[in-house]
Image: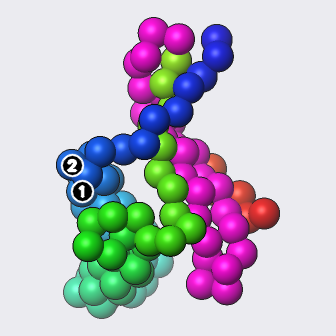
Amino acid sequence: MAPSLRPLTEQEIAVYVEGAIDHYSQERATAGEPRDVALRVAKEQIHGFFPGGRPADGQYILRVLDDDELEVGILRRGLLRDDRPFFGFRTLKSRSCIAVEV
């Protein structure tokens, strides 16, 4: 299998952003932050990576496709606040995510 990559459409990015906000705010709330604060902070941080619904400079988000052009996951490359790069991969099957700072 030779995977291929394709950028997400604007609509797919919008769905991704909303899911990321929900997931991240839940993680923050589970860690003890009040739910309203967790949601506000998650929105601010995620929207910082995707201002106006588009990836910010240095942010890339791609669908990973198999030989049959079926999606197997999402690959994200971005920059942290201090401009250190990171890569993240989320599989569709398990919804698990791996993030690596470079």
Q: Is residue 95 above or below residue 87?
A: above
Q: Which mark is residue 61?
A: none
- In this view, the residue in front, 43 or 59, is 59
Residues marked 2 and 1 touching at CB (< 8 Å): yes
Badge 2 element: helix
- In this view, the residue in front, 26 or 1, is 1
- In this view, the residue in front, 41 or 28, is 41
Residue drawn 42% across the image and 26% down it:
71
Residue drawn 51% across the image and 56% down it:
60
Q: Which mark is residue 14?
A: 1
Residue kind at label 1, given as amino acid type:
Ala
Indicate the position of residue 16 as horizontal and vertical percent values. Answer: 32, 53
Q: How is the image coloured?
A: rainbow
Residue drawn 56% across the image and 26% down it:
4
Residue drawn 73% across the image and 64% down it:
101
Q: Quadrant of residue 32?
A: bottom left
Q: Quadrant of the N terminus?
A: top right
Residue 48 painted magenta: no
Q: Which residue is mark 2?
A: 11
Callout 2: few (<14), some (14-19), or many (20+) C-alpha neighbours within 10 Å?
few
Indicate the position of residue 80 as horizontal and vertical percent values. Answer: 61, 76
Q: Quadrant of residue 81?
A: bottom right
